[in-house]
Image (tube, helix red, strand yellow):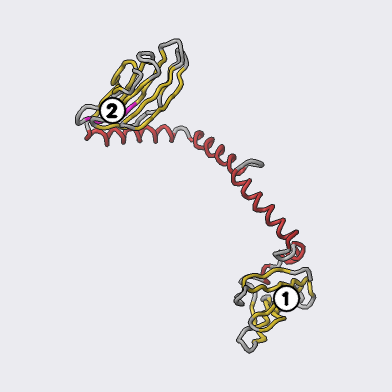
């Protein structure tokens, strides 16, 4: 689709001045803006493109060259590239790009995309290396972002289950972690003990073989504001008690249930 050409070459002044303006009814695809400090002292350099900064107070040491990040950026009719340096005529500027008619921009960008796709298809190792590096930065121990978040969450759960007792005790959970059928879709659920307010005070979970796996009973206080809920866990025979957890029921000032906290009983 044609090569880039020099659009302008000159030196910067110490105030913003136009370095290049896109002609009427033309479009420019920039390739490079190369700045070279010709002086023996450091220079602060700034560039604007279409009124927006693309570089602000970049320090170029004596004799240093620098290429601004403008590759394949598009500027349109009458838009201006401006620049300035600390001292006038101390910094050389070279601008290159492709000057196109507006109707040519679609085919040019399609060609650029095809070139990129072809290169990417022939370099699969680049994607793999990028992916591996990203994955390591997220999941690697001990500093990966995802790993750190997961570790904080896991440590918090350990703290809750081992110390604060707001959940089922860790030892009790361990006893029943292999018996998920007692708490999931494989169990049958029954309720009984309906009180005068229509609340069932007892709920039982049975395994598919009919054995009792878990029972929850409300007690204490007055319906519907019971003060305790006792949960009993049973072994596979449906009779042996493996563990008991008692939950204290808490209500707000108007009597609404707001919290359930396991007790040490």
| Rendering coords of residue 220 (x, y %) | 72, 81
Give the residue pinned by disc 2. Answer: 80
Magenta part, dominant SS: strand
User: Mark 2 or 1, which is nearer the eye?
Assistant: 2
| Rendering coords of residue 11 (x, y %) | 33, 15
Give the residue pinned by disc 1. Answer: 230
Whether residue 172 sits left or right of residue 51 in the image: it is right
Which of the 4 image quarters holds residue 140?
top right
User: Rounded to the nearest whole Å, what is the CA distance between mark 2 and mark 1?
Assistant: 77 Å
For image coordinates 64% across by 78% down, the residue present is: 189
Height in image: 38 above or below 204? above
The numbered mark, 2 or 1, whose residue comes first in the sequence reads 2
| Rendering coords of residue 227 (x, y %) | 70, 77
| Rendering coords of residue 59 (x, y %) | 46, 21
Height in image: 63 above or below 191? above
Q: Residue furthest bottom?
A: 196
- The mark tally for this picture is 2
Q: Secondary structure at mark 2?
A: strand
Height in image: 161 above or below 93? below
Query: Counting other residues with Cα less than 10 Å from the Cα at mark 2, is it few (<14), some (14-19), or many (20 or more)?
Result: some
Query: Counting other residues with Cα less than 10 Å from the Cα at mark 1, is it few (<14), some (14-19), or many (20 or more)?
Result: some
Which of the 4 image quarters holds residue 141?
top right
Q: Which span of residues is magenta-colored? A: 26-30
For image coordinates 51% across by 34% down, the residue present is: 125
For image coordinates 61% across by 48% down, the residue present is: 149
Q: Residue furthest front?
A: 253
């Amino acid at each position: 689709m044609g090569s880039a050409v020099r659009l302008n070459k000159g030196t910067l002044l110490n105030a913003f001045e136009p370095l290049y303006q896109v002609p009427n009814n033309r479009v420019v695809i920039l390739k490079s803006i190369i700045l070279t400090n010709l002086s023996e002292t450091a220079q602060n350099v700034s560039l604007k493109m279409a009124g927006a900064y693309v570089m602000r107070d970049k320090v170029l040491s004596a004799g240093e060259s620098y290429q601004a990040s403008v590759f394949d950026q598009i500027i349109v009719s009458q838009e201006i590239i401006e620049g300035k340096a600390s001292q006038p005529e101390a910094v050389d500027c070279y601008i290159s790009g492709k000057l196109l008619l507006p109707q040519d921009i679609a085919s040019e960008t399609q060609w650029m995309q095809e070139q990129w796709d072809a290169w990417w298809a022939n370099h699969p190792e680049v994607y793999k290396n990028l992916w591996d590096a990203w994955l390591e930065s997220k999941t690697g121990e001990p500093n990966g972002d995802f790993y750190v978040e997961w570790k904080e969450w896991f440590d918090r759960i350990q703290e809750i289950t081992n110390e604060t007792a707001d959940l089922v005790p860790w030892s009790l959970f361990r006893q029943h972690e292999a018996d998920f059928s007692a708490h999931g879709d494989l169990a049958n659920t029954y309720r009984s003990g309906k009180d005068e307010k229509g609340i069932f005070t007892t709920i039982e979970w049975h395994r598919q073989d009919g054995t009792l796996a878990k029972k929850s009973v409300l007690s204490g206080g007055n319906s519907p504001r019971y003060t305790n809920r006792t949960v009993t866990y049973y072994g596979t025979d449906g009779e042996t008690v493996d563990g008991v957890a008692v939950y204290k029921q808490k209500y707000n000032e108007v009597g609404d249930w707001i919290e359930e906290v396991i007790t040490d009983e």
